[in-house]
Image (spheres, rainbow, N blue to C red):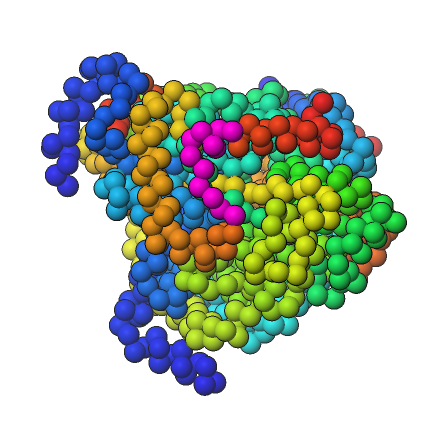
Amino acid sequence: MTFHSIIKPTAIAALLGSSMIAAPALAQDDYPSRSVEVVHQYGPGGGTDRFVRAVAQPFEEITGESMVSISVQGGGGIPAVVNFTQRPADGHSLMAISPAQIIAHVQGRIDMADFKPLARVQYDQALIWVPADSEFETIDQFVQHAKDNPGDLKIALSGAAGFDEITVGLFGLEADAEFVTVPFSSSEMVSNTLGGQVDAMFEEYGPARGLYDSGDMRPLVVFSEERLPVLEDVPTATEKGWDVTLGRWRAFAMQAEDSEENAEALYADIEEAVAAESYKKFEEQNALQYRSELLGPDEFQTFIEGEIETYTTVLRELGYIE
Amino acid sequence: MSKNVIEFSFAFGLCAISVWFWLIADGFPVSPRYEGIDTDFWPKITFGLMAVASGLVALGSLRDWLAARRAPASTSVNPADWGAIGRMVAMGLLVLVYFIAFGKVGFLLSTVIFLWAASAMIPSGKFWIKVVFAPVFTILLTLLFSYGLSLPLPRGVGPFYDFSLLLY
Amino acid sequence: MAEYLDALTYIVSSPTNLFFIVFSVIWGIAFGSVPGLTGIVGVALLIPFTYAFESEQSLLLLGGVYVGATFGGSISAILFNTPGSPEAACTALDGYPMAKRGEAGKALGIALASSAIGGIFGTLVLMLLAPPMAQLALEFGPPEYFALAVLGISAIASIGGGSVLKGLTAGLIGLGIATVGLDPITGMGRYTFGNNMLLTGISFVPVIIGTFALAEVLTRVGEGNKSSTAITDVSTKLPSRKEMKDSTGTLARSSVIGAIIGALPGVGATTASFISYSEAVRWSRHPEKFGTGVPEGIAAPESANNSAVGGSMIPLLALGIPGSATTAVMLGGLTVHGIIPGPLLMEQNTRLVYSVFIAMMLANVLMLAFGVRAARYFALILTVPYAYVGPAIIVMCMTGVYGLNGNMVDIGVMLAFGVVGVLLRVMKYPVASFIIGLVLGPIAEKSLRQGLMIADHSYLEFAARPITATLLLLSLASLLYGFYGQYKLARDRRKDGPLADTAD
């Protein structure tokens, strides 16, 4: 390993004159000049980790620098945000954000002002699924049953007081029907639904499509603006007059103090990476291509503001915040 | 101090903590949505049972203590090994300092210094091996984690962050 | 049969495939044995590399790592009282005392043989019974999970050989500690004292590393000259055939428990090893000896956690549901190859599925073959002076725990529990009960509340299910039996004890 002999003198110099180097980095022509690290709150191998790695592959070919996924798990994502904000704002530390950050912001646990929105890459859509032997054939029957028997229908979802619970909660409010939402881990959610312990589950199309293909699960309604091309018969909630289009999205954010120049440069790289064939293939394998539209810094900022507004309203109506 | 007194104080302490935690649970925010199984449901069961169990342990050791006092012949005197406690506290403090430095100074520097200090505190082994072992082991671990597995190692803050950045 | 032949030809026809199996087992053992780095990390790190290979090859690789890592954890558990991965925590309870007696080779040998036996059993169940086992797993709703957790927890009173009340208290401390952090149902913070970082809660890996590894290093430093010199008379003798034969009942019971619990989604090798340790104590004729280095105390958790590996592949392959955190990561790796996880996976990817069967079988056999040779050399590590080993263990633990989650809170938790571990030992509260409470407590809590939500808050409806009721009654009987044993002991002591006239 030769790098040690080369690097050591510089390292000492850096230690002595570090205050100069540590000053907020100006846009350099060679930015990014080292590996870009993306902090996120999910485990290695999870959806977000795979998302970062999928972008990283073309990103490396484009910029010549690597993109590394850093997993800081637990605590509703708070430790990940703390880890991220403690890093210097030199453009080489990003965070992969999702509705989880919006929810934590609305609950007052973190501050979205710590982030500079960079690019929203994925936008998923979820559905309500019932097991094949369920008595419910359509969403209307399902909602009518809930109206006639408040609290009788149990919907399994993953995670407590998170995106899933809020979306189903909003669905209940919009449809004026009372559901009991039971939080599980995502695998137990499926097994409990298949095993008939609960009546339905809430899940994105990608992870559930295997169960649809085999005929074990039936989708009743999709929460999106438009029907899914692969599920032409499944109505959207909006069609039925329930305004629920919340979807799980995955995006990159920079430090709030990062320079505009760096943001522009990096966005251009990400835009190219996301258009690359390898990423497109990944998107298709995970059934994420239906409404994933790339949003740049400004559009994403507007989108986030809208999300904060929506989640604040829903969380208040559901009684999570005052 | 007699063994029974220490036993009693420890169990009584546990009992007091569980009562305290039960009371904290009583103050958790409640929501009509989760009536009957709210946030406080399980902590109250757990700490309630713990208060009972540790309370019974405390009573038991109190009884033993009183019994032992009435029969002084069987009083067991527990000579505290102050040397052992001192060594443990010293190592504990060293680990605590290492923990703080681990985050602030970064992995490389804090680990080399910790390994030197800790191996010096343990009276076996050879001096020069200890001197060489610390940097060698640290560098091997850095190579393994940072380059081999690309797992994060703490880089410290401020100037230490920049220093660490040049190496891993 | 044709499927097996096809898969076997596929594997044997390419040296790359064989190399993958060998490599993955070694990689897995290495990951398992480093504290903090678990099989999940080992699998996750390999996934990017598998992009370049065929889907069969990538699953060979991941399956081998999973098998190796589950055994690997026991090496550091036995040698340094440092469970390399959570599923090896129980192995340390009896493995380390045995190694400390100078019988490290024997302890490693028992762990290895039990791992291989459990692993092969689990793979056989996977090969022969996957569809019915998957159906059985679907019968398990929250009430059944709750009853299973309670059954394991009910053993806390009988473990440790000391006072029943102290065992209960230690177990309840574990249960209580597990309540810190986010509530699993309402998402509220508990016992965070206004600090949002504490929402992480007290995670299991840092706690076991603290209570086992750190507490052990502190204790040995405290002992000073007495024990800081290396254990010089390390026997590298492996267990005799007779010694293994004595554990036959434990091995059989634990392998079955492991396969069933492994097949349940959401719980895996760790839960399996704890419940089978509890059962080993419960069914033993000398329960008080557990924790002092008995062979069954190693055989039970090791056979169960390796059997759970095969078990947890069942829902993955039969239903597309990962049975454990590691298989969840594997599932993510499969989608990269265009495989859609779901009930059709077995039909659509016959060769893939049968290659995994054969690879897991081979991995277990290889593990045994390598391990037997390696165990002797591993045991010799104990002859290295503690001045190098002790501090190095602390550094490894800090680094491993940080590498796992990148979270400084976890390291703080590890240090705090180093102190708690020392206190529990000194005050003679059984550490085994404490960690059983810690592992099974959250499962009990979550499933009790989920079950009550589903049963419209009716405890009767919750418990009136055949599996639930049976398991709950068994737990109650066990708890009462523990108290009865204690009562009998106390009565006998009162009859002829020295304090006979003053105690009443």
Q: Does the magenta stretch include residue A295?
A: yes
Task: Using the rendered view, name the quadrant where residue B136 is placed.
Answer: top left
Q: Residue furthest right?
A: A148
* Nearer-the-camera pick, A162 or A82: A162
B69, above or below C265, in the image: above
* Nearer-the-camera pick, C484 or B1: C484
Left or right side of B4 for A264? left
* Nearer-the-camera pick, A152 or C405: A152
Quadrant where the C terminus of chain C is found in the figure:
top right
Task: Using the rendered view, name the quadrant where residue C258 is placed.
Answer: bottom right
Q: Does the magenta stretch include residue C86?
A: no
* Image x and y of residue C501, in percent: 80, 33
* Image x and y of residue A114, in percent: 46, 23
Residue at horizontal 58%, vertical 32%?
Answer: A307
B22, above or below C77, in the image: above
Question: Does residue A36 show up?
Answer: yes
Task: Using the rendered view, name the quadrant where residue C160 is placed.
Answer: top right
Residue at horizontal 76%, vertical 34%?
Answer: B38
Left or right side of C493 for A296? left
* Nearer-the-camera pick, C16 or A205: A205
Left or right side of B20 for C461? right
Residue at horizontal 25%, vertical 40%?
Answer: A63
A230, above or below C414, in the image: below
Q: Magenta part of the protein: which range?
A: A291-302
Question: Does residue C218 show up?
Answer: no
* Image x and y of residue C435, in percent: 58, 42
* Image x and y of residue A73, in percent: 49, 37
What is the number of callouts on the image? 0
Residue at horizontal 31%, vertical 70%?
Answer: C18
